[in-house]
Image (cartoon, rainbow, N blue to C red):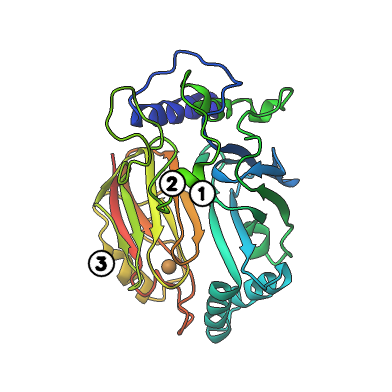
């Protein structure tokens, strides 16, 4: 039932950002990019396509796990192996701060990390980013936090020019049926020219996003509308640089402008909570539930490597939230949030 309620609202939010209303559309048209549905369950992680065309790729991420799914996607850096990256991960999760700090430094060198996202049951998100050709590996971090070895799912990304896989296959399980409105977003623009090589059209990294990349008839900017969405920067001084008010329903662009790893969890807090309250809690060594914690849906933009960026589309209840990052500092091993990487924002 939750999909029937949440997903249409999310799809509507995406459409609203481009000022278009769906009037139906052919599922065969394929103006841009590829779409992959990523689903977490008790059986593990499944993806609808093991191969996609390079360029703009949209991930529809959801979970049926009560504890949620926290899905990471990486590609080993040139000259590095998957095993190198998995070894680094073990260091990052070490309880020894020096080993954790070393793990962060190793991951910066050995991996390119492309999110993906943390989702809860009933709170799917859509992550859109540009992917070059190569092999990418997805896994759920939650079992890893619990001590299990990562179970990797491979996504092969081809060079541009191949066939986009933005239409989910027929006969798809009922589990994914509710996600189809997102995939069809690509095909709601009859007559829009097929872009065979998005990478060639968007030479500036980050100068586009899924909705922003479409043009409306008669508008001046054909492609790549910079700054179309609110931007949250993950900065070198381990802070969130953003507006104090972000959409409760819509898309934001998250950019890691720093030289280290960051992610962005978005969790509800009680109205009136301040960053001082949160900092005080972290420094109090209190192991209990934070006094400002509030039950409710939360999401997470997954880990981004230095220079990485992605768009995340979501629907959350309006209210007060805190943005947090818990990557171990690359010198001290202390989680960034404890060092001050938290920001109270209002979603409205
Ligand atoms: Cu961080």
- Above or below, 171 against 202 in this view is above
Looking at the image, is mark 3 or mark 1 nearer the viewer? 1
Q: What is the x, y in percent for residue 102? A: 56, 82
Q: Which mark is residue 276?
A: 3
Disc tally is 3
Residue behind mark 2: 202
Q: What is the x, y in percent for residue 345? A: 28, 52
Q: Is residue 296 visible?
A: no
- Above or below, 269 against 306 in this view is above
Q: CA distance from mark 1 to mark 2?
A: 10 Å
* Ligand 1 image-quadrant field: bottom left
Q: Quadrant of residue 84?
A: bottom right
Looking at the image, is mark 1 or mark 2 nearer the viewer? 2
Mark 2, other Cα within 10 Å: few <14 / some 14–19 / many ≥20: some
Q: What is the x, y in percent for residue 123? A: 51, 39
Q: Name which of mark 2 and mark 3 comes first in the sequence.
A: 2
Q: Is residue 151 visible?
A: yes
Q: Do residues under tags 1 and 2 come within 8 Å of each other at their CB atoms?
A: yes
Residue behind mark 1: 130
Q: Quadrant of the N terminus?
A: top right
Does mark 1 have its CB less than 8 Å from ligand 1?
no
78 or 272: nearer the eye? 78
Label 1 residue SS:
strand
Q: What is the x, y in percent for residue 172? A: 71, 27
Q: Quadrant of the C terminus?
A: top left
Q: Name which of mark 3 and mark 1 comes first in the sequence.
A: 1
Q: Which residue does the image show at 65% across and 29% down from the upper left?
A: 168
């Amino acid at each position: 039932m939750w999909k029937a309620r949440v997903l249409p609202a999310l799809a509507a939010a995406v459409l609203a950002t481009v000022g278009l209303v769906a009037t139906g559309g052919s599922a065969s048209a394929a103006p841009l990019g590829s779409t992959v549905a990523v689903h977490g369950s008790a059986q593990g992680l499944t993806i609808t396509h093991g191969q996609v065309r390079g360029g703009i790729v949209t991930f529809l991420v959801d979970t049926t796990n009560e504890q949620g799914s926290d899905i990471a996607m990486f590609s080993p850096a040139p000259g590095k192996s998957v095993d190198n990256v998995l070894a680094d991960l073990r260091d990052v999760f070490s309880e020894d701060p020096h080993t954790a700090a070393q793990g962060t430094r190793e991951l910066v060198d050995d991996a390119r990390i492309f999110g993906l996202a943390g989702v809860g049951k009933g709170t799917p998100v859509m992550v859109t980013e540009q992917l070059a050709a190569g092999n990418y590996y997805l896994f759920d971090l939650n079992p890893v936090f619990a001590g299990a070895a990562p179970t990797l799912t491979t996504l092969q990304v081809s060079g541009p020019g191949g066939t986009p896989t933005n239409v989910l296959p027929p006969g798809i399980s009922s589990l994914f049926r509710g996600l189809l409105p997102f995939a069809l977003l690509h095909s709601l623009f009859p007559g829009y020219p097929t872009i065979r090589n998005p990478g060639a059209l968007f030479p500036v990294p980050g100068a586009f996003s899924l909705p922003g990349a479409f043009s409306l008839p008669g508008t001046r900017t054909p492609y790549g509308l910079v700054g179309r969405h609110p931007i949250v920067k993950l900065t070198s001084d381990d802070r969130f640089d953003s507006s104090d008010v972000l959409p409760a329903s819509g898309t934001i662009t998250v950019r890691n402008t720093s030289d280290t790893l960051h992610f962005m969890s978005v969790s509800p807090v009680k109205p009136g909570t301040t960053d001082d309250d949160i900092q005080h809690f972290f420094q109090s060594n209190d192991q209990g539930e934070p006094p400002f914690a509030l039950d409710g849906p939360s999401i997470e933009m997954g880990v981004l490597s230095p220079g990485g960026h992605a768009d995340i589309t979501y629907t959350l209840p309006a209210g007060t939230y805190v943005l947090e990052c818990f990557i171990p500092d690359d010198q001290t091993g202390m989680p960034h949030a404890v060092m001050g990487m938290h920001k109270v924002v209002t979603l409205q």
